Amino acid sequence: QVQLVESGGGLVQAGGSLRLSCAASTNIFRHVEMAWYRQAPGKQRDLVAIIDAGGVPVYIESVKGRFTISRDNAKNTMFLQVNSLKPEDTGVYYCNQRWPHWDWGQGTQVTVSS
């Protein structure tokens, strides 16, 4: 059973930055497409960014130019650098394999104050 552990969230003011991390418990990580998801309060979990096994990223329109997804396959770790944060970026951030999903981790809370 794969375990995913997200970290790095926090409370920041609008315009601030955070670096989110995702650690996976399996070496399968280095061969699969991974993604970051975000769940805003009272809303469904939505895709934010994807990164393939080779490191090629894809972003949703609203985070382009502000978020950067990256990975370190040697350490089974993925990152999300989030800059120029906006209040609408508030939510719990999760990582997972793009598809099929592994069991979800606990996520990391990002709260952006205006």
Image (cartoon, rainbow, N blue to C red):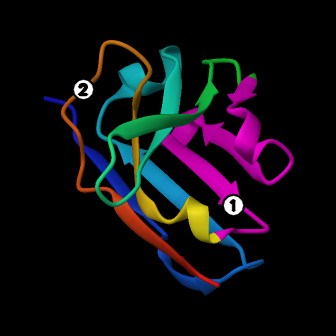
Q: Residue at x 69, y 60 (%)?
A: 82
Q: Specify the segment rendered in magenta.
A: 57-86
Amino acid carrying label 1: it is Val
Q: Name the side, left or right, on which 48 lies relative to 63.
A: left
Residue 22 is one of the magenta-drawn residues: no
Q: Residue furthest front?
A: 42
Q: Name the side, left or right, on which 99 lies relative to 20.
A: left
Label 2 and label 1: CA atoms lie apart by 24 Å
Tag 1 secondary structure: strand
For this rendering, which residue is in front, 38 or 6?
38
The answer to which of marks 2 and 1 sits earlier in the sequence is 1
Q: Can residue 96 be seen in this view?
A: yes
Q: Marks 1 and 2: in contact by CB < 8 Å?
A: no
Q: Quadrant of residue 59?
A: top right
Q: In which quarter of the image is residue 56?
A: top right
Which of the labelled discs sits on residue 102, or is there none? 2
Q: Name the side, left or right, on which 104 lies relative to 36.
A: left
Which of the labelled discs sits on residue 41, or is there none? none
- In this view, 82 is above or below 11: above
Q: Residue at x 86, y 47 (%)?
A: 65
What residue is disc 1 on? Answer: 82
Amino acid carrying label 2: it is Trp
Residue 65 is one of the magenta-drawn residues: yes
> Percent x, y for residue 77?
50, 44
Q: Can residue 76 be seen in this view?
A: no
> Percent x, y for residue 15?
78, 77
> Percent x, y for residue 46?
44, 36
Q: Residue at x 23, y 39 (%)?
A: 104
Q: How crowded is mark 2: few (under 14 residues within 10 Å), some or many (20 or more)?
A: some
